[in-house]
Image: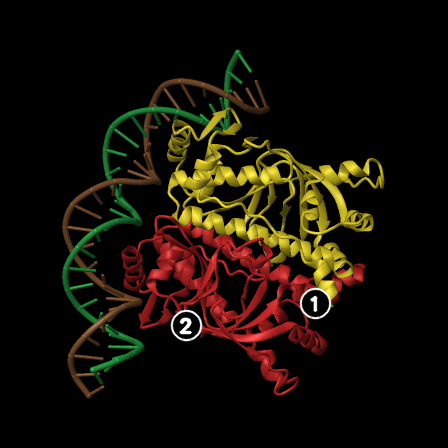
Chain colours: A yellow, B red, C green, D brown
Amino acid sequence: MNVSVRPSTTRVSGALKDIWRSDPFLIRARQLVDLTLPDLQSLRAVIEAEATVKRRRDLVLEGYECSKLYFIKEGFAARYKLLRNGKRQIVNFVLPGDIVGMPGSFLDRAANSVIAVSDMTLQICALEAFVGLCCRQPKFGLVLSWLAAQEAAHYAEHIIDVGRRTPVERLAHLLLEIHSRLALVGLADEFAFNLPFTQEMMSDALGLSVPHLNRTLAHLRAEGLIAINGRRVEILDRKALELLAHFQPIQSGRIPLSEALAVN
Amino acid sequence: MNVSVRPSTTRVSGALKDIWRSDPFLIRARQLVDLTLPDLQSLRAVIEAEATVKRRRDLVLEGYECSKLYFIKEGFAARYKLLRNGKRQIVNFVLPGDIVGMPGSFLDRAANSVIAVSDMTLQICALEAFVGLCCRQPKFGLVLSWLAAQEAAHYAEHIIDVGRRTPVERLAHLLLEIHSRLALVGLADEFAFNLPFTQEMMSDALGLSVPHLNRTLAHLRAEGLIAINGRRVEILDRKALELLAHFQPIQSGRIPLSEALAVN
DNA sequence: CGAAATTTTGATCACGTTCAACTTCAGTGG
DNA sequence: CCACTGAAGTTGAACGTGATCAAAATTTCG
């Protein structure tokens, strides 16, 4: 594994509020359940290290057993598979607040590789440790399930992208999805964001050739739906874009914990 | 909802062994963790009813809120989305032992519809009740996460199908996937199975037109890889088929519960 | 600054869609 | 029981979309 690890600092308090706001995994978890201070502490206890990974390095390699969970703090990655003929399919993009190892570590052997597309920093947690946490605090097991459900919903849309949407529709949908996922963890403005992926990656995600993706992108620009300078994407006509893409935001409901306890 | 419900019978014992073997959800759960008799009983307590659904009826409708879990006991379904232009994409096929409502019920509103492709019988469980169960017995929350991970792995392969595999490869892969999933719950022979889906459904799953799917199927037959009479599919050359499809079986590891408890 | 990665443009061609007709099969009511 | 109906499977011909290959322009990074 191509990661440089440094022991996790156990600075307990520091600026706690900052952590609530700035840690993207916590941001996402708190959209699903209420987290108390003790919850936060037991979560921290389960993190064995923080690591950094350099751009272009593989986080996970297909076919290898892997029993760690990586909570992405910063940076971006892509989950992909290489076929015999040299073609690559990107299954999904990994953003801050996502967990790598969710499908992979739960299986005998990872079904996909995951490559860092930028320098990353992530928090490592042994699978058994997390399972232990779930036993002590079932809340976390539920959060895991809910996050898995969100991911499944994104996968489903991705299947629809490559299966039945036209190239323009796919691309529009991808851009809107990335935008909304970034926004969820505070990494996008209302109508603009920094696209962390190259056209080659997007074409491998959408099942298109690079030239065709490029032309499709040009088409969206020509229609006045988006504007691009460098990595910055501006959404000029969100309504039209959403309509074109058949886009519906994926928003998860909260976990009905209190109701469940009431029912007993 | 187009289901006819009858109150769940609370016959506690009966032929318990039969239930262990014949209930497809239990078969799958037991591949992940050890289940005790009390586990089984608390699981049963959470089922509020058993229901039957007729062929062609929708189990879940896109856009509606839905807070039930359906454990599929018998029959088959397809999770799909309809686009404006009339095209349909089938996101996945639902088999006995699967749970419907896994992504759907966890979100505000279901992102896909689910249609019964045969008469079905299923067990209904309120989401809050299941969450309650997970709180009392964290084991079940973990089972849920693991099943979600398996499903995610299948979704990922499906993305690769429509994105980068050629039509023959896709079809080969679909057939192998269905076969192995059926085998997992004891519904397939080693080299043959009853295909519960029409060519139209398969073409909507694989992003192909019906005529082309038909020709592709003919191609697989001509190559001597499979044989079909009626609904029965025979796998004549599994090795070649797997190679063609880039097929790797998705097998989930067991949940490391004991290890987790040992670590504490 | 130089080298490599990325984006852009163009021309050709194959693959899979579309549309249409026909066949076969299963189910249903007369 | 057979005739009828609709669903499912099969086949053919023409067309168009997006792949492929190649090369240039541009940007990024070591």
Locate residue B260 relative to residue B53 in the image: left or right: right
Residue A102 placed where, x, y %?
62, 52
Residue nearer the viewer, A74 or A226: A226
Residue nearer the viewer, A3 or B213: B213
Residue B29 placed where, x, y %?
62, 69
> Residue drawn 69% across and 43% down?
A27
Q: Quadrant of residue B71?
A: bottom right
Placement of the N terminus of chain A among the 4 image quadrants:
top right
Distance between the alpha carbons at the discs numbered 2 and 1: 35 Å
**Label 1: element kind:** helix
Foreground label between 2 and 1? 1
Residue C5 placed where, x, y %?
50, 29
Identify the amino acid type marked 1: Leu
Locate residue C13 relative to residue A18 in the image: left or right: left
- Residue located beneath label 2 in the image: B193
Placement of the C terminus of chain A among the 4 image quadrants:
bottom right
User: Which mark is on residue B133?
Assistant: 1
Is residue B244 visible in the rendered image? The answer is no
